[in-house]
Image: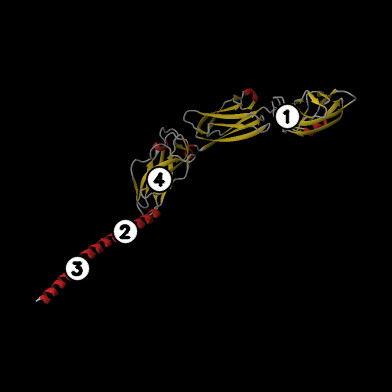
Amino acid sequence: MRRNSSGISTMVGMAIIIAIFFTTLIPLYVYMSSLYNLLSNEINSRRIRDVDRETEDLKLFVEGKSGINQENPSISVILKNTSPLLIRVERIWVMNVETGSPVGDAPCIDRILDVPPGWNITENVNTCVQGFTGRVQFIAVTERGRLFGSAPIDLLRGRIIAGLFPYTLTVSVINMKRGSEYTIDILPLEDADIHPRSITYKATASNENISLSFGATAGTFLVYLKENGILVSAGRLIAPPTNPMAVSLPDYWNVVFILSRSTIQPVTIDLEISAPNRVLEGEAFQFQIILSLPPQAGEEVRINHNRIIQAISLSGDYEQNTLACWPVAETLSPGSTRIALSCSLTASELTGNRNSGSITITVSQLPDCGIGVDSGLPYPSDQDSTSIQVRGQRGR
């Protein structure tokens, strides 16, 4: 009887161990299987989302219904879905191309836009660009995180420039004066508009001519011409007879201001020598040749350095003089004063037994102290000669 009891106890123990093993292993296997399924599903979901994200293709086009008389011009963004997927547009922003910053504080749409495959959706964006002037780009943000942009466009006070200005107004200015600034101001009347409304140009040569173009709508405009900020008087104009000039598009598209031709007459150049009052024997000192061109000169003048150096002469109580000169300024502008030459002079060996003496620096009158840049005419110096006396004494 004892053997049978021992055998039964062993079988019961084995059964209990097997039961414990299976009750632990099977739940663990089920748990691991569920984790693997979750991981596989997440990987597949993300792979599908990535594929869908790359498949998205959205085109943005901007259109404006031009009409200069419209108080609130119509600007719309066309969203064209060229992909096989439904695209959900969550935001549309308008960006300033020049600064890279958003225009306005809020997106252009206040709801999500669903764009089915192959569909076009038009959304009005007036509120985003109202009153804005500059170069902008519209950016659409999709639910999958893609960004799609339109081509940059130019806006003028919230309106598309390309659709507003179908005509061109050309303004020409003939016989400008070198160095003067000419400003063309255009005032549109009634419902007319033009861009830009003002252009300033500085003449770089005497009797220079320019032609400038302005984008405009149909209408009447007053065209003003100013020289150095002052309205050019009719007495200086050969044509047209008045300033400002009224012009109407599209009947007339060109305005020509012909100024009386300026004749360049050479003027004399003021020449001055700057040197110290007193030096020691054998001491090198510096002196300068200074030129001044009167403001009434009609052009810039190129300094004739070689002729000035040849016109320098020295006289006085010294037997030996060493002179060297080098150019400083190259040209003179009307009304300017410039150092033309800087020279170094060493005066040595006073004559006789003198303890002091003087040396005189002289620049003879020059018929061609400078040459006109535009005319090529010679400009003379102003006096028969210019001199300066420098006193010297023996060193102690």
Q: Image check: 25 left or right of 234?
A: left
Q: What element does badge 4 sit on?
A: strand
Q: Residue at x 61, y 35 (%)?
A: 211
The coloring applied to the image is: secondary structure
Q: Earlier in the sequence, mark 3 or mark 2?
A: 3
Q: Which of the two residues, 138 or 13, is positioned nearer the viewer here?
A: 13
Residue 15 position by quadrant: bottom left
Q: Image check: 311 left or right of 85?
A: right
Amino acid type at image mark 2: Leu
Which class describes the residues within 10 Å of circle 1: few (<14), some (14-19), or many (20+)? some
- Asked if labels 4 and 1 touch by Cβ distance under 8 angstroms, the answer is no
Residue 77, visible in the rendered structure: yes
In the picture, the disc for residue 339 is 1
The residue beneath circle 4 is 140
Of discs 1 and 4, which sits in the foreground?
A: 1
Which class describes the residues within 10 Å of circle 3: few (<14), some (14-19), or many (20+)? few
Q: Which of the two residues, 259 or 251, is positioned nearer the viewer here?
A: 259
Q: What element does badge 2 sit on?
A: helix
Q: What element does badge 1 sit on?
A: strand
Q: Is residue 291 above or below residue 49?
A: above
In the picture, the disc for residue 264 is none
Q: CA distance from mark 2 to mark 4?
A: 33 Å
Q: CA distance from mark 3 to mark 2?
A: 33 Å
Q: Earlier in the sequence, mark 4 or mark 3?
A: 3
Q: Is residue 78 above or below residue 300?
A: below
Q: Earlier in the sequence, mark 3 or mark 1?
A: 3
- The quadrant in which the N terminus is found is bottom left
